[in-house]
Image (cartoon, grey):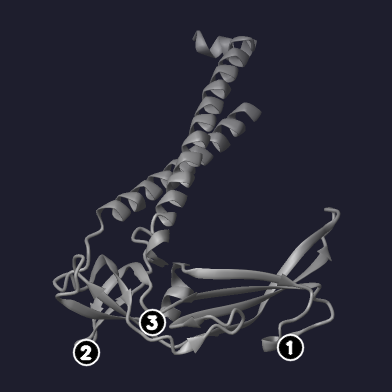
Amino acid sequence: MWITIILFVLVLVFIRLYLKTHSLKKIRRHFLDIPAFDRGLIDCYVRVSGKIKSENAFSSPISQVACAFYLVKVLALWQTKRKKPAKGMEEQKKVIFQTISPVTQLEVSEGTYYKDTDIIQVDMSEFVKKAKTFLMNETIESRNCPDICQKFSNNKYQSYKILETWCSHNDRIVIYGKLVQTLEGFLKIKPTKLAAYPSFICLEPFEDLPLKKLDKQISKNNIWLIVYLMAIVMTIVAAGIYCLNTPTCFYFINM
């Protein structure tokens, strides 16, 4: 009986992992086959590459870097006892403050030279909430609550982690997302909200990061698929040996 249960669990886990890996491979194909920006691809999944047109109208609150866009997030960290029967402590964290700059426009050009340029609007807050971002960033850890969120400090918080992201005028940037056209006729790139067609925004040198992370996950899953397959085979062999050495089971096989 116990061999049957183990075999069922192993097969179930194998199938779930196989389907997940198949989905990741599908996403990888979309990464590689995504078309470059074209005005004729409205409502399509596209790759937009260009320079940030917006001027550096802001200064990042923590690093004081001149930028066209910034995002600051402050996390409070503290320790609590694990729930019984577990022992020891575990870390808790909570976002106590977040601030973001207004919409950033992206200037996109086809080819190397800017003979024909299109202005594509990007609502950075949409990408921050619904997609991945790979921009300039800095992480600072401190035992003191930052000045920008002093009113949210609490005696139970033991430390704070400040995450700051920004990009600046003329930075070369790449966006994967859905190209749309507004009622006013403006072009805009939005997150797809579809797992099979992942959206992200990054500085050009970081463009390979999502694909590398995906390849790493697929490779890891493939290793586990082999492990589970071997475990299934060994369990079936063990079940066969057990069955042959059990008189009742041997009787039914030879009926």
Residue 183's tag is 2
Q: Residues within 10 Å of mark 1 (few under 14, many from 20)?
A: few
Amino acid type, callout 2: Leu
Q: Residues within 10 Å of mark 2 (few under 14, many from 20)?
A: few
Q: Quadrant of residue 44?
A: bottom left
> Tag 3's secondary structure?
loop
Q: Mark 3 — residue?
A: 123
> Tag 1's secondary structure?
helix
Residue for point 53% across, 36% down:
224
Per the model, the C-alpha gap separating discs 1 and 2 is 42 Å
Residue 155, position in %: x, y? 84, 81
Is residue 91 positioned above or below 105 on the image? above
Of marks 1 and 2, which one's residue comes earlier in the chain?
1
Per the model, the C-alpha gap separating discs 1 and 3 is 29 Å
Per the model, the C-alpha gap separating discs 2 and 3 is 16 Å
Q: Nearer the viewer, residue 96 or 133?
A: 133
